[in-house]
Amino acid sequence: MRLNEFLADREPAWTELESLVAAARRGNPTRLGAARIRRLGELYRAGVTDLALVRRKLPQDPVHHRLEILIGDARTLVYGTDARRRTLRSFMARDYWRRVMERPALLLVSALLL
């Protein structure tokens, strides 16, 4: 792989991903709109592929560090969860029982074993 060609080819996508990550961090990520959120996902997946390639072929290059930070930041936006912290009380009151009822077969097996 020629580093200069790789960088010239992929740099615009990384720059676009950086701008989308920055825009999402400035406000609510849902304000990006559906098209830009889809684009964020596309660029994230392409960036993960690029990172895997760079890890294998160019582990000592500075671009490796840049991509790791960028992909890490984008990952929290793509796969992030609700930022609200739940209390133990609310978990035991609602979420625990919901999770138990999602798995009726396991509940039946545990009752039979008892």
Image (spheres, helix red, strand yellow):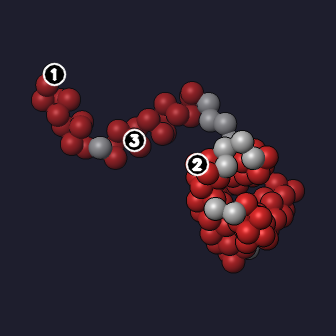
Residue 3 percent location from the top left of the image: 73, 60
Q: Amino acid at mark 3?
A: Arg
Between residues 94 and 20, which one lies in front from this camera angle?
A: 20
Say whether residue 46 is left or right of residue 64.
left
How would you rate the neighbour count of disc 3 (Cα within 10 Å): few for under 14, some for 14-19, many for 20 or more? few
Say whether residue 103 is left or right of residue 34.
left
Residue 68 visible from this viewpoint? no
Q: Amino acid at mark 2?
A: Arg
Asked where in the image residue 35 lies, by quadrant, the reply is bottom right
**In the image, is residue 43 above or below residue 112?**
below
Between residues 84 and 9, which one lies in front from this camera angle?
A: 9
Between residues 70 and 36, which one lies in front from this camera angle?
A: 70
Q: In the structure shown, which secondary structural element does the residue marked by tag 2 occupy?
A: helix
Which residue is most to the left?
112
Which label belongs to residue 99?
3
Label 3 – label 1 distance at C-alpha = 20 Å
Which residue is most to the top?
114
Q: In the structure shown, which secondary structural element does the residue marked by tag 1 occupy?
A: loop
Label 3 with label 2: CB-CB less than 8 Å: no
